[in-house]
Amino acid sequence: MSKSILERLKEGVVLGDGGYLLALESRGYVQAGPFTPEVTIEHPNALRALHEEFLHAGAEVLQTLTFYASENKLAQIGYANRLGEINRAAVKIAREAASGKALVAGDLCLTWKYKEGDSRSIDDCRRLFDTQIGYQMEVGVDFFICETFLWVGEALIALKCAKKTGLPVMVTLAFEGPKTRDGKTPGEAAKILEGAGADIVGTNCWKDPYYMLPIVEEIRRAVNCYVAAQPVAYRCTPEVPFFTGLKAFPDKLDPFQLTRYELGDFAKRALDLGVNYIGGCCGCEGSHIRQMARVLGKVPLEEREWAIDYQHPQSATEAYKTLRER
């Protein structure tokens, strides 16, 4: 039997995967704006290929593409009646791609329905989460990732719903600024989630590596449980330190793309801070995960040896070396 996520974390850092919806949007399979995951049933091979790309790059966990696979989000595109089909297909595809080589994490995310102190909205969120969990559990996942929550209150609802399965649960928050929407600092929020039973807490999405590192450092100091960090691979700005607020969002982000080496540097710095689960989020492609895997010692630094001869070049890599060094 494969080791659980908690067993793997006990042995050392675990490398997650990258972002799915924006990657598939750039390939023409997802609509920018709603970013709903009907690709799971309309173009399953495209999703399977991206899972396999992340696995090949070194990812040890594949997340199901069930972000925004809730009834209210799917209703925006007229697919609410295919809720179960989309959630089950997402888990099935991830399972097939993982082929026993990686764990499969069920996925829950912010619903945009949560209103602090509003019992009706709280009940709505609980119903949406329970429904998704039920469909995902029909196929079977290894643990749950509850991600990209702006409110600690909504994250707690998702956590409690996921904990009922008896599986380990990871909860990560997204930060628009220094605090959550309900006024909690990263450290305060993480402690609340740890106290409510989260096995892994942390932050994902919204922030690039530069703006995420201080947040994850604060979280690491605040809790004793495992800590996760998954930044976006788009450069944010001092004026707008979260990528979803950039004028380029949702479909003009290409000039803001970070290099694989910037994500690799993040992985090294996060590891030095004591982060246990490191991965990527929106904009993070296979090349980014590959470099993170190299930095974390998950894959070799080079694929294979090759005979380099700068005096008798047989590639542009050799021929123009002096020009690149100027």
Image: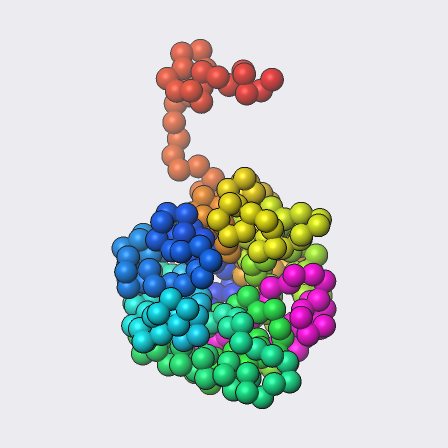
Residue 81 in the figure: left or right of residue 311? left
Viewer-side residue, 289 vs 1: 289
List x then y, in percent, for residue 212.
Answer: 64, 56
Q: Name the image quarter holding the N terminus.
A: bottom left
Look at the image and say whether residue 178 sits in the magenta stretch.
yes
Can residue 50 be seen by looking at this rendering? Answer: no
Viewer-side residue, 176 vs 49: 176
Residue 315 in the figure: left or right of residue 213? left
Look at the image and say whether residue 269 sits in the magenta stretch.
no
Give the color scheme: rainbow, by chain, secondary structure or one colour.
Answer: rainbow
List x then y, in percent, for residue 29.
Answer: 35, 53
Q: In percent of the image, x 66 and y 78: which residue is there? A: 192
Q: In percent of the image, x 54 and y 15: which residue is there? A: 322
Can residue 238 be seen by looking at this rendering? Answer: yes
Q: Name the image quarter holding the C terminus.
A: top right
List x then y, in percent, for residue 308.
Answer: 42, 21
Residue 108 in the figure: left or right of residue 149? left
Farthest top residue in view? 311
Q: In percent of the image, x 33 and y 60: which residue is there? A: 39
List x then y, in percent, for residue 90.
Answer: 34, 66
Viewer-side residue, 215 vs 245: 245
Relative height, residue 268 to residue 124 (above, below): above
Relative height, residue 219 to residue 193 (above, below): above
Q: What is the tally of numbered marks visible in this picture?
A: 0
Relative height, residue 140 to residue 54 (above, below): below
Q: In percent of the image, x 52 and y 68: which residue is there? A: 147
Residues in magenta, as a range: 166-194
